[in-house]
Image (cartoon, helix red, strand yellow):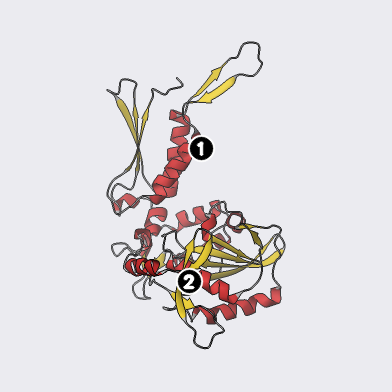
Amino acid sequence: MPLPINVNDLINGNTIEWERLEFKKGWNPNSVLHTITAFANDINNWGGGYIVIGVEEKDGKPILPPKGLNKKRIDAMQKQLLNLCNLIKPNYFPVLEPVIFQKKHILIIWAPGGQNRPYSCPINITSKTKEQTYYLRRYSSTVKAKENEKVELYNLAGKIPFDDRINHHAEISDIKPSLIKEFLNEINSRLVEDTNIKPIEEIGKQMNLIDGSTEYLKPKNIALMMFNNEPHHFFPYSQIEIVQFQKNKDTFTEKVFQGPLNIQIKETLRYISSMIIQEKIIKVPKKAEAIRVFNYPYEAIEEAVVNAVYHRSYEIREPIENESSLKASLF
């Protein structure tokens, strides 16, 4: 099943934080099961994570080119993993995709945060007793949960992250296939090929955007935030507001950005780059090169905007606000 992410970006950590990635040189079913369980528990609400098998790692980073896997063994690995996941309590099944990366066969396991946490699995799958325990991700490592962490997991049992909850006031038709296709094209996901031949229900399930029983399929909140043209209808004030004050602060201009979250980010950064960030060129005597300075560092603003959009609580009905004064220290 194609993943909703570009494999090259995934392995190089361009789109996923390193804490959400684990690389394994070869097939170690015991370790893989523990990490799947840890990602499913998602104690930090990161959205689960990915296990890349066939790529060696050092200090949490991939060693490239990859070692790769024997193509004949990949099918057996997938069958074994299906049996292993039946040992997770309650049952939990990740998404698998065998891919060719840098001319080598590898296996990628996508384990999104589960809706029935906490999850436990056997400490040792070869043991007759199959003693169960809970596993968590701490930084880039999978560890056994301590007693206080088990309590935290139980407290989270009824707290599914807002973006991962089913929206009972929306329908599958509220998800726009054109926006999904545009997004998948942009990240260069192989899943984009399926958007022309598969129904939105199937694509939505593959991307973890839709959930529910066969007779009551509903979009998750994240699907409406990313793939609906007017998410503010479902989540009031899910918008970005830029308020730009003049020097005396008696007058100001305001710009509001609405629409899918990823588009809000793009349009906001484009506006800031063209309308707010200013360059000053300082000529230096007896030097050919001039000093070029900016009133605001674009990279810092970009990170602030992205973090503000993706880490805010959309249960709180307030816009994301950014105030800017034209009286910058450099000008």
x and y percentages locating residue 84 in the rendered image:
53, 80
Q: In which quarter of the image is residue 323?
A: top left
In-front residue for pair 138/270: 138
x and y percentages locating residue 132 in the rendered image:
46, 79
Can you identify the residue that label 1 sits on?
A: 299
Q: How many marks?
A: 2
Which residue is pictured at 71% across the width and 73% down the height?
Answer: 70
Q: Which of marks 2 and 1 is in front?
A: 2
Which residue is pictured at 44% across the width and 48% down the height?
Answer: 262
Which residue is pictured at 37% across the width and 64% down the height?
Answer: 172
x and y percentages locating residue 218 in the rendered image:
35, 67
In-front residue for pair 89/254: 89
Quadrant housing the C terminus: top left
Residue type at mark 2 is Thr
Q: How far apart are marks 2 and 1 (CA)?
A: 36 Å
Task: Identify the element where label 2 is drawn.
Answer: helix
Residue type at mark 1 is Glu
Quadrant housing the N terminus: bottom right
Residue 236 located left or right of residue 326: left
Residue 207 located left or right of residue 60: left
Q: Can residue 260 be seen in this view?
A: no
Q: Can residue 69 be seen in this view?
A: yes
Can you identify the residue that label 2 sits on?
A: 37
Residue 118 located left or right of residue 282: left
- 10 Å crowding of disc 2: few (<14), some (14-19), many (20+): many
Point out the residue furthest to the front here. 147
Residue 18 located left or right of residue 226: right
Q: Which mark is residue 31?
A: none
